[in-house]
Image (tube, coloured by chain):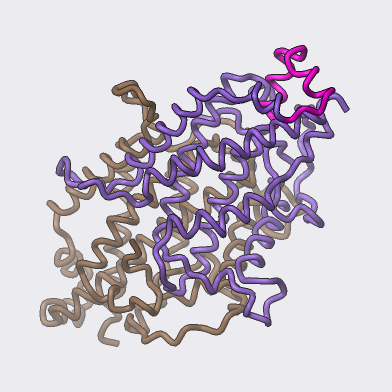
Chain colours: A brown, B purple
Amino acid sequence: MATAEGSCSDDSSLLNLESIRDSLVRQEDTIIFSLIERAKYPINSPLYDNKYNNLPTNSLFHFFLKQSEALQAKAGRYTSPDENAFFPDNLPTPLLPPLNCTPVLHPPGDSININDQVLNLYLKTLLPLITAKGDDGNYAVTAASDVNCLQALSRRIHFGKFVAEVKFRDAPADYTPAICAKDREALMKLLTFQSVEERIKKRVEKKAMIFGQDVDLNENDNEGKYKVNPSIVSQLYGDWVMPLTKFVQVEYLLRRLD
Amino acid sequence: MATAEGSCSDDSSLLNLESIRDSLVRQEDTIIFSLIERAKYPINSPLYDNKYNNLPTNSLFHFFLKQSEALQAKAGRYTSPDENAFFPDNLPTPLLPPLNCTPVLHPPGDSININDQVLNLYLKTLLPLITAKGDDGNYAVTAASDVNCLQALSRRIHFGKFVAEVKFRDAPADYTPAICAKDREALMKLLTFQSVEERIKKRVEKKAMIFGQDVDLNENDNEGKYKVNPSIVSQLYGDWVMPLTKFVQVEYLLRRLD
């Protein structure tokens, strides 16, 4: 069941395109489950407001995300090369000794972190699309659901580093001229396969239909109602997840010869 | 999308049997999603070991769960009548002022908390059934998945308080003699509907098949492989979730006339 989950014990799986692909497919389920769970609650805007001046940070959500990351850092989350924090500065050290991992990624690219973009996209664009209007006061469970969504999306998007590393190792000559020329457009072209992207968009839409239906023992009683609109999931992948993953790949490749 | 989610804004939904039923059905999805997500990782036994003496608590997982609850308490989670902490003592006070809720539950029953049993059942019985053997070192993500599972199961099981309150309000005369006689067996009989329980077991099994399949664009390519064994989910409900929910109901009713 465990595939390319990023620990030392299976670092080799992070350098194997088939295994990376399996993980990306599996991560689709995680992302869709997390969106469905977040959609249980209305948008709950006060959670993201800066109006609570008695808080140590900007908003209750900002506080919650930062503290969640600090706790997970203590449990060692960010020692894994496939995890990137939203607030990477001053994270506490892990309580357990680190595993002795062989670095998989090229160091200059390893540090790429576009979570500012992921957070902004999630809060400003995605949340209003998947939630109902309103405020039910359930801020803690809402924030915990948000953290699950954000971590799943961030992990998926930053997996571009592994994709890029493997593609480069498989065919360095294909990428080296564009890297040397710092030609982002050429790299983006090399990394873009329209038919593959269309398949992924269709698959995540299908998954959103399957996972977001109301299942009962009677057949065909769902009447096309889904907990998260499947076309929004398809749009999420087409407009943001895949473009941002490719952005990470391009940025990684540009640093690959440093 | 939001049903009986326990905030003040919909307290009335926690006293409406139809709405409670809808929430219980929806919670099945949450529980199954969380189990599927946990099953991505092997059992990762060191996470639960007491061998790390440099930790402030028994095991890394104990520490993680306790600290997660402390953080969520700050965000107000345990002000909601449908949330019960695993470590309810000395939780920090919420950072935001509490909502002015009308109490829904009868106070002596409100404090029922069988999370010790839920935690023990989860760690000792359920985890070995849904995870592969092994240790991939991904303790932080594993622990976070465990917390999601535990909170979903705890919420479902303690929902028995609302079920009991509504059933009592609807027909106090049916329950009063058994309550006065402290007759647990008679109360358990009044709360048991074999055919309903069979339907629930079948439904969660079906959900585990639907949510735990590998979805691809080709049809019929799953070959009966599921991320969590559907019969284990059915067993989880039949042997533990429903009996423990009824245990909570009986305990609640026994305090209902105090």
How many marks can you see?
Answer: 0
The C terminus of chain A sits in image quarter: bottom left
Where in the figure is residue A46, as x and y percent of width and height? 64, 41
Q: Residue at x 75, y 32 (%)?
A: B252
Q: Residue at x 40, y 32 (%)?
A: B202
Question: What are the residue bounds of the magenta stretch?
Answer: B161-184
Q: Residue at x 17, y 41 (%)?
A: B220
In front of the other: B44 or A226: B44
Q: Main secondary structure of the magenta part?
A: helix
Q: Residue at x 67, y 52 (%)?
A: B72
The question of residue A27 being in magenta is answered with no
The question of residue B168 being in magenta is answered with yes
Where in the figure is residue B166, as x and y percent of width and height? 69, 21
As displayed, is residue A221 above or below residue A34?
above
Is residue B130 toward the left or the right of residue B5 in the image?
left
Where in the figure is residue B100, as x and y percent of width and height? 79, 32
In front of the other: B168 or B90: B168
Is residue A254 toward the left or the right of residue A33 in the image?
left
- Please identify the quarter of the rendering in which residue B102 is found: top right
In front of the other: A146 or A13: A13
